[in-house]
Amino acid sequence: MKRLVTALSLLALGALAQTWNMATPYPPGNFHTQNILQFVKEVEEATGGRVRITVHPGGSLFPHPQILPAVRNGQVQMGEVLMSLLANENPLFNLDSIPFVVSGYEDAWRLYQAQRPEVEKWLAQRGVVFLYAVPWPPQGLYTKKPVNSAQDLKGLRFRAYNPATARLAELLGMTPVQVEAADIPQAFATGIVEAMITSPTTGVDSQAWDFARYFYDVKAWIPKNMVVIGRRAFESLSPQDREALLQAAKRAEERGWKMSQEEEAKALKTLAQRGMQVVKPSPQLMADLKKAGETMILEWQRQAGATGVRVYRQYLGR
Ligand code: PCA
């Protein structure tokens, strides 16, 4: 009898304890990944070890564009995705990657609050539960040569990481080439690209000082990563464990927004220490980028539909 009880309780434990996988696109040392590792640790603790999550960073389990599809069809339980990578599926995701819609973290937070309910709904319709989102530091321009206006960018091969950066390249007379963050050093080394706009963080991750001399701190937009879980995995949890997961997600979000802001200053310093010229953009360059941003937000409003426009208006407070 005793043996039977032990066997049964082991069985029950086996059925309850879950080991999940989580696919993420960015490198292990990146603050987003570090934040996720802390999140995962807290989930494990808060569920008494019933939920263990193995994080696979750097696109090692699924390449970035396949992470959300893999979560959707249950190939992997959890994932992290750059929201604006999904711009072609829903324009709502694009809004945080259009130049100068936000100017700073406070704006970025308000924009997120406006986007979030619709993003949640859209994902839920696809069997995915939204957990939280964390911003990258504001985006700046990396070049080999000095750039004083958009004229100086014309003809360059420009690294794009989502539909918005590709469109921006076109508007500025550059040729966009989609390159994932992990492939940046290689792409510059082989001349596939010659300039990019991304965060100081991704500049540090890719050792931008090896291939670029200038960083123009334009702070053009503040894109976000989101962390999601497949509905089947989520619903396999007991109500308490679901709540524990959601609470840990909430803490990860708060921590992540702080980390991002601290990270900006730290990464800017590293770029300078490594010999890059970290410079303020000229008024002409700013004006040219702003003009491209204005075109992009007009284009966006045309394709965003009623929901998109409502979200944008809500953010603007109109
Ligand atoms: N880093 C990511 C997305 C935005 C950012 O700052 C990248 O460059 O791919």
Image (cartoon, rainbow, N blue to C red):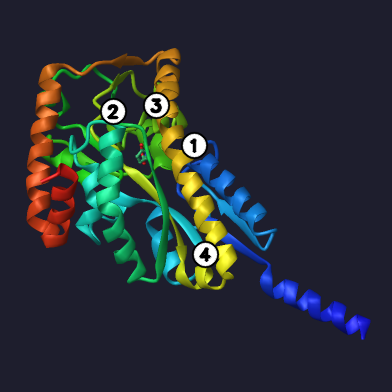
Q: Earlier in the sequence, mark 1 or mark 2?
A: 1
Q: Secondary structure at mark 1?
A: helix
Mark number, residue 265:
none
Q: Residues within 10 Å of mark 3 (few under 14, many from 20)?
A: some
Residue 121 picture location, percent across and down: 30, 65
Q: Which residue is mark 3?
A: 264
Q: Which residue is mark 2?
A: 140
Relative horizontal placement of residue 138, taking residue 258 as reference (left or right): left
Q: Secondary structure at mark 3?
A: helix
| Residue positioned 38% across, 47% down in the render | 225
Q: Is mark 1 within 8 Å of ligand 1?
A: no
Relative horizontal placement of residue 228, taking residue 315 as reference (left or right): right
Task: Kindly identify the amino acid type of the residue bearing the numbered disc 4.
Answer: Gln
Q: Quadrant of the N terminus?
A: bottom right
Task: Kindly identify the amino acid type of the residue bearing the numbered disc 3.
Answer: Glu
| Residue positioned 60% across, 54% down in the render | 43
Residue 32 picture location, percent across and down: 47, 41
Q: Is mark 4 within 8 Å of ligand 1?
A: no
Q: CA distance from mark 1 to mark 4?
A: 22 Å
